[in-house]
Amino acid sequence: MDMETTAQLPPRALAGARMSARRRKARAIRRSVVAFAVAAFIAAWALIYGQMVTGKDPVLTKKATHAATHRAASTSSTSHTPSTSSNSATPSPVVTSQS
């Protein structure tokens, strides 16, 4: 709306024109916010889905690595036989785990 048009309109029509302009602007802002939120959600979901499909699940790999390490440590400590060689003065490594 330009100045010439607003000067010619009666007050009620001017208020109605301003209100409709405000509604159009609010609708455009809402649509852009919703579009951004949906796009961000889809992008995050696609990233997680892509990691799961390729087998790069960070939670499962940490547990699998921890379990494999724990199993290897427990089998090596149970099958260890004391040796009487000169290396017996060196302490064997200790494996600890926190829960």
Image: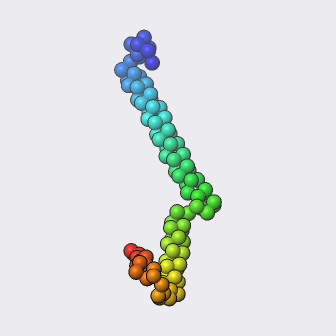
Q: Quadrant of the C terminus?
A: bottom left
Can residue 67 be seen in this snapshot?
no
Instruction: Determine the image quadrant of residue 98.
Output: bottom left
- Residue at 42% across, 11% down: 4
- Residue at 40% across, 16% down: 6
Residue 47 location in percent, x, y? 56, 53
Give the residue furthest to the front.
86
- Residue at 54% across, 75% down: 68
- Residue at 58% across, 53% down: 46
Residue 59 location in percent, x, y? 51, 66
Closer to the camera, 45 or 59?
59
Give the residue furthest to the left.
11
Give the residue furthest to the top.
4
Closer to the camera, 43 or 80?
80
- Colouring: rainbow
Q: Is residue 5 above or below residue 17?
A: above
Closer to the camera, 28 or 33?
33
Instruction: Determine the image quadrant of residue 15.
Output: top left
Can residue 98 be seen in this snapshot?
yes
Q: Is residue 81 above or below residue 54?
A: below
Q: Quadrant of the N terminus?
A: top left
Q: Is residue 62 above or below residue 76?
A: above
Tally the numbered discs: 0
Closer to the camera, 33 or 69?
69
Q: Is residue 20 above or below residue 50?
A: above
Instruction: Determine the image quadrant of residue 10.
Output: top left
Residue 14 location in percent, x, y? 39, 21
